[in-house]
Image (cartoon, grey):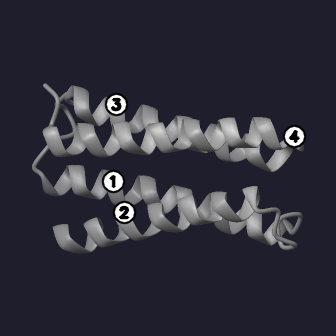
Amino acid sequence: MISYETYKILHIFTLFMVVSAMGGVVAEGRWIPNKTFKIVVGFLSFLVFVGGMGLIARLGFKHTEPFPLWVIVKITCWIILNLALVTLFRVEQKKFKGFCVWISVVAVFVAVYSAVTKLA
């Protein structure tokens, strides 16, 4: 069985890697058109989700229980982060890329705030 701390490290580290990849996309690194880079970023985003679900399981939530509000907020923020990431890969205008980054920053902040305060 995987421990709570392992899931926490997986969740935080992969989130850091996804946000770093977003910075690389905004900086227009030469590796961005590479399909392998996009696949790796998608896999890292999936691992963020796996780590988060593992944390929820280690907190003692059962399969039949509905998620509390803070978990729903975090899942919504994860979806928003992924939509912004896909948009960053497809958009050329710098102004719109900056907007996507700000949306991502707000989504990550809201997700962290909801997890720390455990919104009811």
Cα distance between the residues tagged 1 and 4: 32 Å
Q: Of label 1 and label 4, which has the lower sequence position?
A: 1
39 horizontally vs 63: left or right: right
Dots 2, 1 in contact, CB < 8 A? yes
Which tag is nearer the camera, tag 2 or tag 4?
Answer: 4
Residue carrying label 3: 73
| Mark nearer the N terminus (2 vs 4) | 2
Q: Quadrant of the N terminus?
A: bottom left
Q: Indicate which disc residue 106 carries.
A: none
Q: Amino acid at mark 3?
A: Val
- Residue 19 visible, this orientation: yes
Q: Which residue is mark 2?
A: 11
Q: Earlier in the sequence, mark 2 or mark 1?
A: 2
Whether tag 3 and tag 1 are in contact, CB under 8 A, the answer is no
Q: Which residue is mark 1?
A: 52
* Residue at left offset 54%, top offset 57%: 45
Instruction: Determine whether the residue tagged by mark 3 lies in a helix, strand or loop.
Output: helix
